[in-house]
Structures are given as C-alpha cells and as structure tokens.
Amino acid sequence: MESSKLVRLSIVIPAFNEAGRLPRTLELVESYIASARHWLPAEIIVVDDGSSDDTFHLAQSTGGHSSLERRVLRHDHNRGKGAAVCTGLRSSIGRQVLISDADLATPIEEVERFAQAPENHLVIGSRACDRNLIEIRQPWWRDRLGRGFNLIVRSIVGLPFSDTQCGFKLLPGWFARSTGEGLTTEGFAFDVEMLVLAQAWEVEVTEVGVHWRHVEVSKVSPLQHSVEMLREVLRIRRLARAGLLPIRPQGAPLPTCEKS
C-alpha cells in the first residue's frame, strides 16, 4: 500500500448485536481520538458481523466527528469475532491498527500505554500483568476458565503471554493487513493464531497491563465457546506443525529489535 494513502491510526471494532451500546462506544472513541491529536488522521472501522438488531444502521447514522472517517462494513450472516476482525484489518489503511471490543471493557484511553512501545511491535493488552488495574472483576468461575484457557494455550502452542484474549491490541499496519488476509480462525481464538503468526514472522510482541472492567452483557457463552476455542487452538497447532501458516509477506519490515 502506498504510504501516501495511510492514516496514522485505524480502529477496528467488531460488533454483533451491539445496538444498545455501540453509539455510546463510538462517541467515546471518536471524542478521545479527536482530542488526542497525535493519533490523527484516524479512521474507525465498524464490522457488523451479521447482527439481527439495528447495529448496522446505528453505526452508520449516529454521531461522527469531522476529523475522523468512519466506515461500516457488514457480513450477511454471523461468522464469528475472528472473521469480523479480519474483515476490518483487511480494510484498514493505518500505520498502526487498534482492535477494540465494542463494549470498551478496556477504555480507549489505554491506547496511550501502548504508545510507549516501538511502532513496529504488536502490542497486546493484558489483564494478568497487573491485576490491580482490573476495575470490575468478572465472576470467579469466568476468571478460572480464562486462566485455565491461558494455561492450555501455553502448553499446546507454546505462547509465553499471560493473556492472549484481551480484546485490545495495537498492530503495525502491514502486519494487520497481512494477518487479515492470512488468518483462518473465525471464532474467539483468532488472537492465538495471530500471536502464533507473529512469532513465526519474528514480529516483536509487547504485553502491557491495561485497565479493564467486566461488562455483564456478553456474547460469550463460557462453556460452549471454551470448547470451541480449544478445538480452534488444536487446529492452529496442527497448521503450525505442518508448516501451513502463511509465509512472511515480501517487503514486510525485518525485525529491528533484539528479542527479549
């Protein structure tokens, strides 16, 4: 992509049946990015993942800010969070691309913590680096499931990170668009495949503790989706072991930092 067409920051927000809270989320995100002018010019990409409510039309019609472009993309049926994220990543034109959940469980202001890392790093938010930053804790059984899933991820695919599933990540633009094209996981475990791909392509990953608060209304069914995610992680391991992951794109920046 020609550098002249890039904006400073793309923000990708996957959304499924988010009519109740998406307008407020967009208002908060746009207001903050417009006031923190070092992120401009910026764009917001909402990907409606086949919602059955008014998510798509509200995303198109509510709010808006003169200094940000907003684009709304739509799947004709519900495909999964990973698929929605990938659609947004492919469409992005930012030098960096932020993935943020529609519930803003991690407040948009936390992107400033990420700005301390080099721009060529994949920066992932973590609820485990500093649990004092958790403002509203999730029920104990959800917390146990999350920790158990992280242990499984560590043992199955060897990722060293303490929290792969926090829905707040900042990607180098080239990596965002390349993973948007290459990721195969359409469900909630897409983060795991993204991090496995980052390791395979020698992309530096920085894990940063972020403020986070549990949002009670959730599209995640813990037991059902935990089983689905386990299947996805096992499939990702098979792809990696068989050498079937996408290769590093030609022209992608080479690593410039020593591995920590």
Image (cartoon, rainbow, N blue to C red):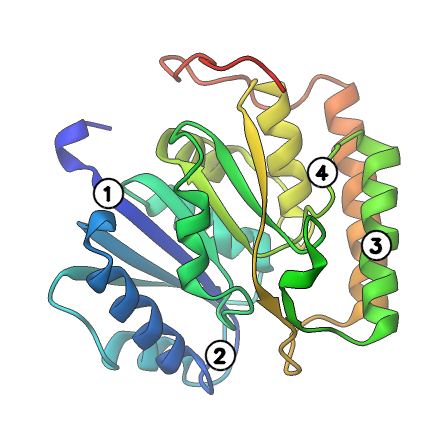
Query: Picture coordinates of residue 231 (x, y %)?
Result: 83, 47
Observer-side mark, 3 or 2, equals: 3
Q: Residue at x 49, y 52 (%)?
A: 85
State the residue in front, 108 or 222: 108
Kind of residue at badge 2: Glu
Is residue 75 visible from the viewing direction of this image?
no
| Vertical position of residue 63 compared to residue 212: above or below | below
Query: Taking 33 as reference, is 167 left or right?
Result: right
Disc 3 versus disc 4: distance between alpha carbons? Answer: 12 Å
Q: Using the image as rendered, state which of residue 40 and residue 12 is in the foreground.
A: 40
Label 1 secondary element: strand
Q: Earlier in the sequence, mark 3 or mark 1?
A: 1
Which mark sits nearer the N-terminus, 3 or 2? 2
Q: CA distance from mark 1 to mark 4?
A: 27 Å
Determine the secondary structure under disc 3.
Answer: helix
- Residue position for label 2: 18
**Amino acid bearing label 4:** Phe
Which quadrant, please, contains the N terminus? top left
Mark 3 Cα within 10 Å, few/some/many (few <14, many 20+)? some
The residue under the point 52% across, 79% down is 17
